[in-house]
Image: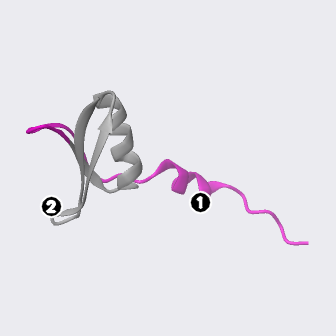
């Protein structure tokens, strides 16, 4: 297992949240970063290396919920 630091980055580039977590692989740490960031920009660091940097994005679940027909009230 490796120790990773996940940083959620705000629009100004400042770190909003920093979390240290143990993961089996880089991929697992990146997935955890996606969940933690909840659509915000984030970075995943292993030791002194930034192994992943992602810009903010619109979550597919939010877009899907907007397009889903609402049930009619009876």
Please give the range of residues in magenta.
45-74
Residue 62, placed above or below residue 25: below
Question: Residue 56 at x, y = what percent?
Answer: 30, 53
Residue 12, placed above or below residue 2: below
Q: Relative to 9, is 67 on the left or the right?
A: right
**Residue at which label 1 appears:** 66
Q: Quarter of the image holding residue 26?
A: top left
Residue 61, placed above or below residue 2: below
Q: Upstream in the sequence, badge 1 or badge 2?
A: 2
User: Which of labels 1 and 2 is toward the front?
Assistant: 2
User: Regarding mark 2 in the picture, which secondary structure is present there?
Assistant: loop
Q: Which of 74 and 40 lies nearest the eye of the viewer? A: 40
**Residue at which label 2 appears:** 13
Residue 38 lies in the magenta stretch = no
User: Regarding mark 1 in the picture, which secondary structure is present there?
Assistant: helix
Q: Quarter of the image holding residue 16?
A: bottom left
Q: Residue at x 36, y 33 (%)?
A: 28
Question: Residue 64 at x, y = what percent?
Answer: 58, 51
Measured Cα–Cα span from mark 1 to mark 2 = 29 Å
Q: Relative to 72, is 58 on the left or the right?
A: left
Q: Residue at x 15, y 64 (%)?
A: 14
Q: Which of 74 and 12 lies nearest the eye of the viewer? A: 12
Q: Quadrant of the C terminus?
A: bottom right
Q: Quarter of the image holding residue 25?
A: top left
Q: Quadrant of the N terminus?
A: top left
Residue 73, placed above or below residue 23: below
Q: Residue at x 37, y 46 (%)?
A: 34
Q: Residue at x 41, y 48 (%)?
A: 35
Q: Which of 6 and 38 lies nearest the eye of the viewer? A: 6
Question: Residue 7 at x, y = what percent?
Answer: 23, 53
Q: Relative to 74, is 48 on the left or the right?
A: left
């Amino acid at each position: 297992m490796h120790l990773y630091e996940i940083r959620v980055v705000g629009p100004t580039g400042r770190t909003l949240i920093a979390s240290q977590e143990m993961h089996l692989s880089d991929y697992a740490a990146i997935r955890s970063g996606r969940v933690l960031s909840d659509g915000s920009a984030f970075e995943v660091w292993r030791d002194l290396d930034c192994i992943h940097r992602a810009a903010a994005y619109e979550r597919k679940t939010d877009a899907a919920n907007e397009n889903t027909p609402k049930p009619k009230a009876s």
